[in-house]
Amino acid sequence: MALPHVLHTASEVATLRHQLSEQGRTVALVPTMGALHAGHLALVDRARELADVVIVSIFVNPLQFGAGEDFDRYPRTLDADVAALAGKADFVFAPDVNEVYPERIGGEPVPAKHAGVVGENFEGASRPGHFDGVLTVVARLFDIVKPEVVVFGQKDAQQVFLIRNMIHQDGLPIRFEVIETIREVDGLALSSRNRYLSEEERAAALALPHALLAVARHALHSPAGELREVGREVFEQYPLVRLDYLDIVDPTTFQPVSNDYQGPATVVVAAVVGTTRLIDTENLERLHA
Ligand code: PAF
């Protein structure tokens, strides 16, 4: 199977984009930070269904990591990633930091996108500035690649909410496609960070999907307050895991729902297992107060 062509510069992508537009071919972009797993490959497969040409970007974005986070140890596995994309993606865009943020060359600050109040909750509360960094890089990648379609994974529910909003607010002519979380057979959501887990931590990480399952089981007959308790109680059985948050939000606002809320809802959870921070999410069709 053919390996994707690897492009490293924004100008190579601009030339390609120009040629593709001339040929009337559409482009789907799958933004990633590499360390690809089956969850990413599912995004790429969906991208393949929606456009003529699939570009996967691989860039570990320094702006979305806080001090003391795992930027330095984040896995960088470009050769393996390119091999995994054989027969699936047409191009990989693997820029270095100066290609994405050319202002850095002259020592200028990078103008940031702002995620607003939703960006300060949940992941944003534990990782201040994280979503400003995510939106900034995603806007840059959209600007460089100019895709007709982009594909993201639902596991990062807050990121999905904020990027959808940005596309809407900035009036970008982009189809925003979200696909469901891909899980291991025992329920653990696939994540590039799972590779940090020891065997014991890997077993303990099941606290996250187990909590989501417990909430989903009670969703038809318990109000939101009780559901939060049901989910949080699951973590008491996992002493290796430190729960950061488990909450139930309105998918249209990403704000926690009130106790008498009825309607579709999203459960969001984050926890630290050893030194590894994991997140997960589940959509609930309907809550009945
Ligand atoms: O979800 C990710 O892997 C990253 O946040 C993204 C969207 C590629 C931006 O760096």
Image (spheres, rainbow, N blue to C red):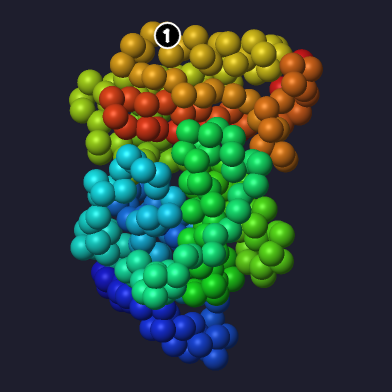
Query: x%, y% of residue 270?
Result: 46, 29
Q: Is residue 238 above or below residue 275?
A: above
Query: x%, y% of residue 47?
Result: 49, 62
Is residue 158 rendered to the left or right of residue 169? left
Residue 167: image quadrant is: bottom right
Residue 193 visible (yes or no): yes
Of 288 and 227, nearer the camera is 227
Residue 89 visible (yes or no): no
Residue depicted at x 71% and y 66%: 171
* Secondary structure of the residue carrying numbered label 1: helix
Query: x%, y% of residue 129?
Result: 50, 46
Residue 259: image quadrant is: top right
Residue 21: image quadrant is: bottom right
Q: Is residue 123 above or below residue 50?
A: above
Of 139 and 289, nearer the camera is 139
Q: Quadrant of the N terminus?
A: bottom left
Q: Is residue 142 above or below residue 201?
A: below
Q: Circle 1 is placed at which residue position?
A: 236
Amino acid carrying mark 1 in the image = Glu
Residue depicted at x 63% and y 66%: 174
Residue depicted at x 79% and y 17%: 260
Of 108 and 164, nearer the camera is 108
Q: Residue furthest front?
A: 107
Is residue 263 rendered to the left or right of residue 197? right
Query: x%, y% of residue 175?
Result: 63, 63
The total of numbered circles placed on residues is 1
Q: Quadrant of the C terminus?
A: top right
Mark 1: few/some/many CA within 10 Å (<14, 14-19, 20+): few
Residue depicted at x 32% and y 69%: 96
